[in-house]
Image: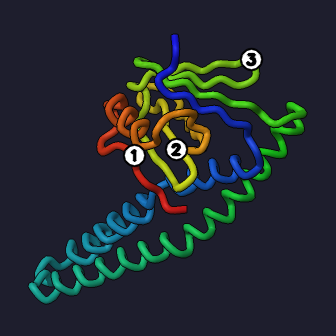
Amino acid sequence: MEPIYHFEYTETEKTFQDMYLMFYQSRSGYGYKLTIFFMGLLILFMQVSPDPSIVTPKYIIQVAVIWALAFLLGFLGNKYIYAGFNRKNAVKSGTEAYTQRIEKRGTELHVSIDCYEEEFVVSFQEKQEQHTYHEVTRLMETSTMFGTVVGGVRGQKKMVSFPKDALKEADIDDFRRFMTGKCTNVAGGFKELKV
């Protein structure tokens, strides 16, 4: 059976770095948002529970402004400080993973990804992994890579990522629409990540 879409590439150090950049960037900023939200609730509860009479319109406005500033600082810290830290670690981790793979196998890995009507198959060396589109829980892309997160609903999550320029004889926009239509557990299609 002929695949609808076919990707083929050889993993290089740059490919690994781009994969890790996507992985690190895909980790969202929910951590700081949840921390600020629950710490704000905790502080509010600790202040209000001994003396509920302090809750005045002025107090509510002060709390709202302070909370908004905390979220703004968290957002800016996440965007500029944490993201830079992530980029640095991603490049380092990608280089290390590539080096380990070369040491283990003695050669770069040739990878192909074939997309069929009901599943996609990742092939490398003598190994094949089959994934249904229903298993995909996230779709993401950067300027150079596509990525999918497979599993996580009832099993271990796995990220399958591949270079956009590895797509053979097909249109990238058509592939994007195909995956968005097939991956019904993903709301909104591909999330574009800035790396």
Farthest residue, direction bottom? 58
Q: Position of residue 100 (x, y in %)?
A: 83, 42
At x 52%, y 75%, the residue is 80
Vertical relation: 2 (above or below) 71: above
The amino acid type, in three-letter code, at marker 1 is Phe
At x 50%, y 28%, the residue is 5
Answer with mark 2 or mark 1, whichever residue precedes in sequence: 2
Q: Residues within 10 Å of mark 1 (few under 14, many from 20)?
A: some
Q: Quadrant of the C terminus?
A: bottom right
Q: Nearer the viewer, residue 106 or 60?
A: 106
SS at circle 2:
strand
Q: Which mark is residue 146?
A: 2
Q: Nearer the viewer, residue 194 or 66?
A: 194
The amino acid type, in three-letter code, at marker 2 is Phe
Q: Which mark is residue 126?
A: 3
Q: Which residue is mark 1?
A: 190
In the rendered view, does 141 fall on the left or right side of 90? left
Q: Position of residue 124 (x, y in %)?
A: 70, 25
At x 50%, y 23%, the residue is 120
Q: Which mark is residue 64?
A: none
- Image marks 2 and 1: residues in contact by CB distance under 8 Å: yes
Q: Position of residue 4 (x, y in %)?
A: 47, 23
SS at circle 1:
loop
Vertical relation: 5 (above or below) 80: above
- Image marks 1 and 3: residues in contact by CB distance under 8 Å: no
Answer with mark 2 or mark 3, whichever residue precedes in sequence: 3
Q: Residues within 10 Å of mark 2 (few under 14, many from 20)?
A: many
